Amino acid sequence: MKNRLLGIHMIVQNEEHHLPRCLDSLKPFGMECFITDTGSSDRTPEIGKTYGATVLHADWQDDFAQARNISLPLAGTEWVLCLDADEYVSQGLEELLKYLPKVHRSISRLRITIENRYGDGAEERVICQPVRLFRAHQGYQYVGRVHEQLVRSSSCRFGQDGAADMNDSRIATQDEEHLLMESEPLAPLCLIHDGYLASTIAKEHKPRRNLKLIERELADEPAQPFHLYNLGVTYCQLGQIEQAIEAFRESLRLTELHAPYRPTLVRDYAKTLVGTERYDEAHAILAVERQRYPAYADLHLLYGETLEQQGLEERAYESYVRATECLEELQGNEQSNGGGALDSPYVTEAGSDSYRAYSAMARLAQKRGFLKESAHLYELALDSMFAYAPAWAGLADVLQQSGETDESITETLLARCMGIEEPSQGKSIGGEMPHSYAVMHEDHLVQVIYVLAGCGAYEQALKMLDTDARTARIHIAERIHWMLCANKISEALQLAEEHWGTECVSEFNMPAEHRMDWALACWANGLRLSDTFLATSHPQEKNIWKVMDRVLTQLSKEPRSVVPVPQEQKLMQWGSQAEIIAEKVVEQALYTGQLTLAEQLHKLRAMMVREYWGTAVTLRREFASLLYRQGYTIAAANILIQCMTENELDAEGLFLLGETLYAKGYDEQALSLFEQALEREPAHRQARAGAAVCYMRLALKAIRQELVRSPSAEMLIAQHAALEQRLRTAEGIPWRTIFHAKERRNQLASGTNFLMHDREG
């Protein structure tokens, strides 16, 4: 027997893949269900009937509101819940059925919580709390061809009624904070919506369909700000960012201050500006709007990101702190209201008021050298979201920067998984695993393994693969790659041949990175590419691999006397495909730390593309840049100096040399190189910032020397203080190359004799 308390109303079209999941989440409670099908060509109607739903058929009129209104007069329940097929209940349905009978008769609309997933990560969610529940037969209906809104028949004005957006719940409307929460309480129901995952958007036509409908709405109501806002969102989904910015800008100009969707408009507009590096525009908007919506954590987080990019790190940190205070205020409000689920008036990205903000604070603290504070802040982020990958990576990175051994880092990460503050006193992971860790959840251990590999602690990551079950959780390709990075080249080759040599004989679609690791494992062991490797290569690439294999073998034996035969010369001048493979293999060899091999592959590449580049110096500069980005700064500097003696150094190379000298405190020499880089490329942003910083550091040095002679000179003291502040801002601008744990390990390498740099297995 169907309950008469709550009924489900849906509109669908070709949703056979999503509908079962949605209906399964409702199935145990036997609710009345109306499904309006607008012309499916798949099994959607049959699936609905299988679940006991009443399926209505209607022609699609390019109008979501018209379709959604069809079933409302048929409701036989007190309350109506409107769902989409790409949504499903995650929790709270049983609690909702207990809650609804207690709702006061004066309340006719309720909000629910929806998690809109935009990626596969647990943190990749946007949370909103729109109206989705309302009393049946109370005069409610929907209006709007797209992004339809719930209104009572006496009110149809777009975006001013506090109603929900049923098609894209990320754009659900809200009213001013407390007014909305009082008039439309939050019910204890949570849905998950994944219809706007990037992978789903790529396969479906939703954004194009929405664009067509919004354009029709704007034809009827030109310059209507709510439609312009939705137009901006749709342009973002289509990747048309410039058009999105223009639509957001015009919508914000026209939108009234009390419009309930306005806070979300500000958020999306600012986020788009930050994403396109228009920090001055974002700053101008957020400096005002965060004051208007002081409890909106997303705006404080975006403002902090903007300030950080502008070099205003102290103010950025304060803005991140303010974002975390928003959560505390919400929790305080809930306690004063008797507890319950957190009730927010804003559409917000998950973690904006907690783990995202704490991680941003930790990053700034690490940059300033406050490593203990940084580690503590990363741990606070993990307290809020255990699975937040950036916080795990950040914690491992700051521990490595603090001088912790890989064994100590492993112990700290495992202790973090167990929720204890200090590592156990048992044996480290380098030996036998402590018993307390042995019973830890395998998911946590696998996460630690990936974090260790991410910070370059490959030996420790591989040592933790001490059970068949845990090894099975790590892809074979990952293990081979880690073995190469740990210079366990024999084990890497053995595993590659065992796995790919027997299981992938007929496969030509192996990811390029996996094939390159297989080739590197062969060459690093002094072996030619196996017949199996060549048999599994794509036909269009097989000859390229053959030529590379033969010439590389000659290079390793007689580096000065390699002369390709005529057929190979023809292949080596093949063009773009050969160039791409050669370039990527060099990069992969550097990434795995096989530097001797990387140098030989670089020479091979120079042979392959000599007619396209014209000069070997260009390739040397590029090789030096690759070395530098991987942290081999001294080796890169030696190559760049050689290029400079030949007067063949470009702006990028000059900048990298200047940055190397700047890091060692040679400001005058660094300044000279930055200025030369700007002479060659006036728009080189990093060189311009580096030159400015050097000028200020030299000026400060001169002022300090004068202060030694005239310690009470007030003008000098004031100039010194002002210049120090400007220098902090300039140094805060992200102009320097960022080296993380893996690259910092490589900075110990020096000189150009790469044979000395390969790590011992």
Image (cartoon, grey):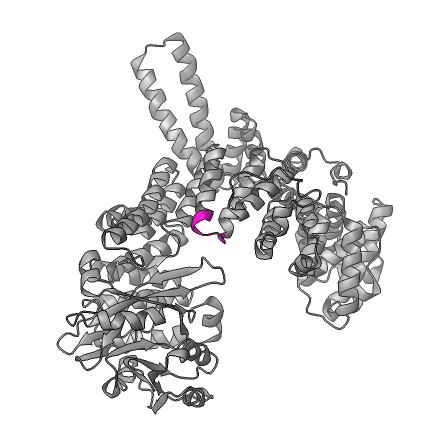
Q: Quadrant of the N terminus?
A: bottom left
Residue 727 in view here: yes
In x, y percent, where is residue 736? 50, 38
Q: Is residue 507 above or below residue 1?
A: above
Q: Quadrant of the C terminus?
A: top right
**Residue located at (34% from left, 91% from top):** 57
In the displayed structure, does residue 549 sit left or right of residue 670?
right
**Residue located at (39% from left, 53% from top):** 351
In the current view of this chain or complex, which residue is farthest to the left? 154
In the displayed structure, does residue 485 sit left or right of residue 184?
right
Hey, which quadrant is residue 33 in on the image? bottom left
User: Between 319 and 21, which is closer to the camera in this rendering?
Assistant: 21
Residue 589 in view here: no
In x, y percent, where is residue 577? 68, 63
In x, y percent, where is residue 46? 44, 90
User: Between 322 and 250, which is closer to the camera in this rendering?
Assistant: 322
User: Between 243 and 129, which is closer to the camera in this rendering?
Assistant: 129
Is residue 231 magenta-colored?
Answer: no
The magenta span reads 382-388
In x, y percent, where is residue 168? 34, 70
Looking at the image, how many numbered discs can be counted on the residues?
Answer: 0
Q: Is residue 69 above or below residue 506?
A: below
Q: Is residue 487 above or below residue 644?
A: below
Is residue 387 magenta-colored?
Answer: yes
User: Between 627 and 266, which is closer to the camera in this rendering?
Assistant: 266
**Residue located at (41% from left, 44% from top):** 358
In the displayed structure, does residue 178 sit left or right of residue 671?
left
